[in-house]
Amino acid sequence: MHDILAGFRAALGLIATFDAELWDISLRSLQVSLSALVIASAIAIPLGTLLAVQRFRFRRLVISVINALMGLPPVVVGLMVYLLLSRSGPFGVLGLLFTPWAMIVAQVIIITPLIASIAHQAMRELWAEYHDLLISLNARKSQRIATLIWDGRRSLLTAALAGFGRAIGEVGAIMIVGGNIDQVTRVLTTAIALETSRGDFALALGLGFVLIGLALMVSLATHWLSRTESGERW
Amino acid sequence: MVNAMFPLALQGVTVARRGRPVLGPVDLVLGQGGPTMILGPNGSGKTTLLRVMHGLERIGAGSVGWQRDAPDRRAFVFQTPVMLRRSTIENLCYPLRLRGVGRADARQAAAGWLARIGLSDHAHRPATRLSGGERQKLALARALIGQPDAVFLDEPCSNLDGHATREIETLLRAAAQSGTRIVMATHDMGQARRLAADVVFLVAGRIVETGAAPAIFAAPKTPAFRAFLNGDIVT
């Protein structure tokens, strides 16, 4: 209990004093996770929607694989990305290892199946509702997908937020590919891991509260911007 | 007024679901004119026949031949109206936007239709919050806004009261007068008598009797249709 209270105090102290390191780490966390979220959503949402509306031979297999990939161990993803981006790896020439870009790549791989799977479930239900109407209106496939994405945006927002939650709380993969380098690749989760290993539980908890606060703020801001809870609007 | 899409000829059309025949074989020609009312007891294949004609249902055998096939000139109104998760006016704009009509023009046309069906005050409310009758009027307006050559309606008034039914029928008469071919399934014999120019009567997936409306109601040729008109149970 003492550590938790000390963590609260540390968090408030860091925020109240505009601690430069905290801001730097927090901004980097947001930058990496939001970038990963945008890229992953751009892949996963159309993919999930396409899987809902398009019938093809190995569709069930693809859905099963995506669902299975939701449980992909982040440490394994980190290791794979490390091997691909290391100097001797196929993408070593890009020099991305131990940069925020490597962390973004790892997070994209981790959260894309999660967003795609939730998006697919939501779009499948909406497609069942809209199927006959859109066919009867002679909507082209691209128009059907666009309609589902637009009309299902509240569910897709939930899918994206689930992806963001997983990305910003992720530590295993980004520790491996980012290296937790001070002022370069250190983010809130890796900083928490570092402070815990140093035995500074109060600071680690403080960073943890900041992390939770950031995730909540992003979620609330997204809901507010999209006005998803407004009674007379969609 | 000549409707270039008709006649529509169905030859030997069958539909089966999970190996069980639900329609056919059906031979039917729908010429110019109408409205055509499709009558029959529950499970007789009325909905399936409408869906086949519109192209929503895959046929097992036979052929569906239009004089001029233009899928974007056909519309369908479902028994339970499907509302897009959008505002009332955006639901009306949707078919026009699919065809590339500009947003301003689509909204102008939609506003005109909303006034016509008495839903102007609900223009910016979510369409799913409308009452059953309002939804069905909106669904019909959405089907008619693109001025289709043919509209297929699957018991559009089955859950509506007399006032809403009258409004729907007024819209259908106006559409028919402006050249839209109406093909409608209904259980309501009064409605069939009010609207029909010709009738198709189905039992167990097969056409039992067809004919021009005044004559077929006055002198049914088959015992099944006679029983149906008398309100007896037909299976």
Image (spheres, coloured by chain):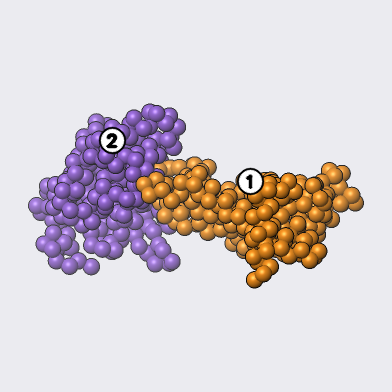
The location of residue A154, given as percent across then percent down, is 49, 51
Closest to the camera, between mark 1 and mark 2, is: 1
Q: Is residue A185 left or right of residue A129?
A: right
Badge 1 amino acid:
Val
Near mark 1 (Cα within 10 A), the count class, few <14, some 14-19 or many ≥20, is: some
The location of residue A160, given as percent across then percent down, is 58, 52
Residue A10 visible to an observer of this rendering: yes
Q: Residue at x 39, y 59 (%)?
A: B15
Depicted B2 relative to depicted A225: above or below: above
Q: Which image quarter: residue B2?
A: top left
Could you say which is closer to the camera, residue A144 or residue A19? Answer: A19
Q: What element carries label 2?
A: helix
What is the chain letter for disc 2? Answer: B
Q: What element carries label 1?
A: helix
What is the chain letter for disc 1? Answer: A
Where does the N terminus of chain B fall, quadrant-wise? top left
Q: Which residue is drawn at 23% across and 56% down?
A: B159
- Are discs 1 and 2 both within one chain? no
Residue with the mark numbered 2: B113
Could you say which is closer to the camera, residue A201 or residue B193? Answer: A201
Depicted B72 relative to depicted A223: above or below: above
Q: Which mark is on residue A38? A: 1
The location of residue A67, given as percent across then percent down, is 62, 63
Depicted B33 relative to depicted B77: above or below: above
Near mark 2 (Cα within 10 A), the count class, few <14, some 14-19 or many ≥20, is: many
Extreme residue toward the left, this view: B218
Could you say which is closer to the camera, residue A147 or residue B76? Answer: A147
Residue B64 visible to an observer of this rendering: no
The location of residue B17, given as percent across then percent down, is 41, 63
Q: Is residue B98 left or right of residue B178?
A: right
